[in-house]
Amino acid sequence: MSGFSDNIMRLSGRMLSQYPAQRDWDGKLTMAPHPGIIPTFSIVTLSDNVPEQEIMKWNGWGYSDSKFLYNKKGQAEFTGKRYRLSGMIIPGLREWMESTFSANLQHKTPAAPILNSSAVQPPTLNEAFLKELKSTGIPFSHDAEDRVFRSHGHCLHEIFALREGKIGRVPDLVVWPNCHNDVVKIVELACKHNVCLIPYGGGTSVSSALECPPEETRSIVSLDTSQMNRILWIDEKNLTAHVEAGIVGQDLERLLNESGYCTGHEPDSMEFSSLGGWVATRASGMKKNIYGNIEDLVVHIKMVTPRGVIEKSCQGPRMSTGPDVHHFIMGSEGTLGVVTEVTMKIRPMPEYQKYGSVVFPNFEMGVACLREVARQRCAPASIRLMDNEQFKFGHALKPQVSSIFTSFLDGLKKFYITKFKGFDPNRLCVATLLFEGDREKVLQHEKQVYDIAAKFGGLAAGEDNGQRGYMLTFVIAYLRDLGMDYYVIGESFETSMPWDRVLDICRNVKARIVRECKDKGVQFPPLSTCRVTQTYDAGACVYFYFAFNYRGLSDPVHVYEQVEHAAREEILANGGSLSHHHGVGKLRKEWMRESISSVGMGMLKSVKDYVDPNNIFGNRNLL
Amino acid sequence: MKPVVDPMLKKRDDFEDMLEERRNSSDLRYALKCYTPVLYKGLTPCKVSELKQMVLQSDQLGYVITQVSKEKGVTSDEVTGEAAAILEEMAQRLQLSTVRFFAFTLSKVFKTLFRSICINEEGLQRLQQAIHNHPVVLLPSHRSYMDFLLMSYILYTYDLALPVIAAGMDFMGMKVVGEMLRMSGAFFIRRSFGGDKLYWAVFSEYVKIMLKNGYAPVEFFLEGTRSRTAKSLTPKLGLLNIVMDPFLKGEVFDISLVPVSISYERTLEEALYARELLGVPKPKESTSGLFKARKILSEDYGSIHVYFGQPVSVRSLAESRVNRSQFNLIPRHIPTRPSEEILSFVNDSAYRLVRAQEENMVLKPWVLLAFVLLQKQAAEEKQGTALDELTEQAVWLRDLSRQYGAFLHWPDHIPPSEVVSSSLSLHRGLVRISEGRVQLALEQGLLYPGFVILSCASYRNQALNVFIRPALLASAIHTAASNRKQEIYNSFSFLRNMFSNEFILCPGATVQDFEEACYLLVKTGTLQINQQEVLITERGHRTLAFLTSVLDPFLQGYQVREMHTQRHSVVFNTNGLTEKQFIPAVRKFIIKHLLTGSLLKCRLRYTEVLSSDLQKNALAALIRLGAVQKIKGYVGFTHLHVHVGLIG
């Protein structure tokens, strides 16, 4: 292994001062995102010493400089320079928003511009813990902004409250361990002084996992892993990399790319989510068909628990040594300890990438095609099927076309599909594809998939449509903030199910959302749409998007939560799972027992009781 | 069309007479009109033949075919052939041209037979909405052969999607008519196919596919057969189970069940039913028989009221009742026996739906007159009732039944005496009026008075559902040893249990029924109820006396039944009787006692006890209560003395 010592890397530009978190994002911002996702991303270099709140939104998604807004002419525009869509006018968005939600530009609901520190409760500090922590030299902060920033994920109710300037229970202290040993020290001190620890990675949770339990009376310490962001070594013989768990997805890919490798793990949140978070929630990536989900990618995990450090003694690719202890860690959602280091599989970077898309006459045909692709086990790196509403939404997000020729071509395509091929524009749907590998194989693979699609009435619809489909994944979260400026709230949630139930669940859940909105007094018909995002041998993963105009409702978030609750009930009643990859957190806890049986709950509880008898990792997720 | 508005129908929709337009415009043009119904929004249009293919290629049927071929040791092709033959025998061949033919013919027939056919048009609008949104199941009440032709006729007239109708195989006997019905949407099911897995699979899959795809509304009769007594029959669960299944298994978002109440002022089969109840066998359905029935055409059958009820969502019925995730772990195409939970859910739903039918049945003044005349008859008032008195009692009963929520169609703008006399004249075959006095047209001989009385009872029965709960309470007060509430509840509960084969009383709803009865009787000032006791008010006696007498014929019927069984078990204890022999034996027993005029200690006053329906129900109740045991088809008495006291 000594030969690989050269491969140990460190991120530069990460010198920590007293409040390291304020520099948290500096390094990242100098990086190009992964080419696979956003090919024409422009590189932005920001000077050091910019406070993180100015780089990242404190009460919305993503970078502060990137957002949708309506300019003076009333046209939608995406600001900034980070994304392909940045700086572009999106002519169709306004009309889509007005017609889909009956939203009106005259009715605005702006967010509170800055955090009012006086709204934040003063920290409950455990002086003895603090004193010993100081002696270790590990950086920490009890600044209000640092605490609020780590008190939430991105559930609708969390963001909505922030926009209104409402702050609930937040951590009392934030610590920034720099390495595994720092974490060991912090956990020891926490046990000694009975302090509650909540691990914090990228903050992209959508399961209320980061919310501080309001009933917690101990001092709550947020353990921010962002400084543990190094690739410790790369092993080219075994194609593995040993990485600190605080590293964020896009950094990991970029750094590995520099050495000609990648992990291929690309969850939609990869710009911001961390390796430790993926492990703790059993994450799934867009290209899992080639690279696998996190459980397939992980070779070795090191986790610090109140009982000590858990890890395996070797890195064998598979073991028969009783139940796999990794599976206690993966999905433990921060209830057992802090994941500090992970050995992951890596692959040589693909030689060639190609996007693609297929238009189907209806969603049923599309699902049948995906099922056949899965049956033949020939799924491309990614294959996703949007329903008709999402197809229209994607259409509305087309940027302004510069040349008359392009718009003429678009018109021609539309004519061909709807008039010549007889597709009903209100029923057709589109699948987006991403192929990866060496060039020849990609082209061969592409042909195979398009041939199958043709059997289900699918028409190839070009690379551009495919690429735009994937771009949408990254900007859709920004779009929610625009909606919230104009009385529109919404969110997405996911599930997985056997193939034979895909259509039934999609139909029933969408219909349930519409009905519940009506019953709960929502004045305007909601947007209720879905897409199939992953295929497996025995089933699929489906995402639902749901949003509505809440004008006229006194407690829109409560209505939203009731509808989402009903939608989840509908999913479970129809044979869908509680979650495919978002995890349970506190949002879906109530269904755990019925999901895994009482005995199953008992098993998990007994592990928790053994590993963490004093509930030091007291975020109260999962169980 | 001019609306026919009854001021008393406030909480229900108004009716309109659909025959009025037929009388004023061309039937031919009507039969050839442009027909473009609103269809289910999720419909994938398909032909009759494609439908059959879908059934034969379904996973459900495929599974059973494999199973059957393994069990019987024959090739699956053979079994598939068998399945195709079953389907051929079963399937409908809905054809617009046949419907147009019926539309033309029925217009002529209806105009001759009926004064009006009144429909609540709002109900039809609701139905249209329901058809657009979800698969629809139409559940009409069943009092006449006319019902399903009438249903299709109405839906055609109002440009609504034509239903496919589950019909009994007996129609198939009428060759031409059977095929005609098939072409107007009927599909035929064997009356019994007990253990025939393949038949069941073909049948249930056929129904489900038509329903799920929104091919057409599926129509069937919850009661399974025509009610000869005009009382609703205990619902049959098989088909309801099948149509609810696609929702329970998540194959559709929801299903709308639409109860339809069809009430006839005069039933076409009036005489036929009474004869059947008296043991004269039902004539076999035949085309030539139908032509013989033509003389019916020369009579006046008054009006028909058809009320399309509120669509009932299966989803809301099942909400917080059924755990749908119970189907998550077995592939849905594998047939499984429904769980207890599902069975009891379907059963409760069925009762709710039959009650919904009952509640929207229009009652005519004659129904109330039948009550009075039968009670007078039982009280042996030989000279009959003076018209004034009859009118007074009918008006009293009118007000009472309205207080109990009856859907009474009594024209308030006409003087009551005229209402009474016009009712009497429509039913002149059943009454005799001489010198201003009215009585049932009983003649000498035993069978004949029974005939008139059973016909008359079938009208009275239409309103029994209005009075049944208060009547059970009244009888309970009558039989209970004290006026303590608990004791009255106990005897209410006993009576209710005993009569649960006789009336539509939802299983397990004793407390609700008791409370409903108490509420009605307190509200109308008949009773006062405090914590402990139930007290009868001064003016309550008349009501209570009436209510008690409502149940009297039934009480006596059950009593006779028990006595007969008791006696038999003494005499023929060793060999008993088979169930089939039982009913004629009881009838003979009753006739003997009616003739001699005495029956053990108490007098037998109600000729109605001759009704085979009553006897069957009573036997079923006795078996259910454990008073009679059925051993290998033989009936024997066990320990009756416990209950006899209470009933007596």
Image (tube, coloured by chain):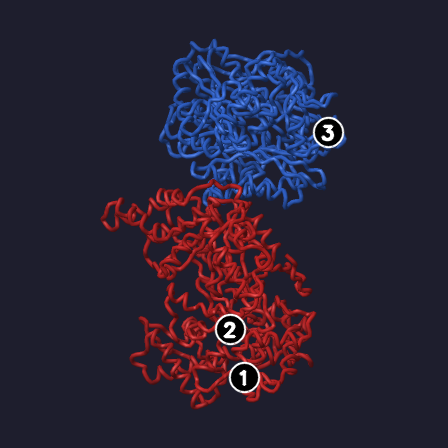
Chain colours: A blue, B red
Element under disc 1? helix
- Please name the amino acid that badge 3 sits on: Leu
Displayed quadrant of residue A311: top left
Is the residue at mark 3 from the same chain as the one at mark 1?
Answer: no
Helix, strand or loop status at disc 2? helix
Residue beneath the point at 68% across and 28% down: A59
Q: Look at label 2 and name its amino acid.
A: Ser
**Residue A106 picture location, percent across and down:** 75, 30
Vertical placement of residue B267 versus A115, above or below? below
Q: Disc 3 vs disc 1: which is toward the camera?
A: 1
**Does residue A428 appear to the left or right of A214 in the view shown?**
left
Q: Give the quadrant of the N terminus of chain A.
A: top left
Q: Residues within 10 Å of mark 2 (few under 14, many from 20)?
A: many
B421 w.r.t. A327: above or below = below
Image disc number at residue A13: none
Q: Residue at 66% across / 69% down in the picture?
A: B411
**How busy is the neighbourhood of tag 1: few (under 14 within 10 Å), some, or many (20 plus)?**
many
Residue nearer the viewer, A357 or A238: A357
Q: Earlier in the sequence, mark 1 or mark 2?
A: 1
Q: What amino acid type is highlighted by mark number 1? A: Gln
Closest to the observer: B426 or B400? B426
Residue at point 53% right, 16% down?
A: A34
Question: In terms of depth relative to the viewer, which is nearer, B446 or A251?
Answer: B446
Q: Which mark is residue B458?
A: 2
Badge count:
3
Q: Are marks 3 and 1 in contact (CB under 8 Å)?
A: no
Badge 3 sits on which subunit?
A: A
Q: Which residue is mark 1?
A: B377
Residue corresponding to mark 3: A105
Q: Position of residue B39 (x, y in %)?
A: 53, 44
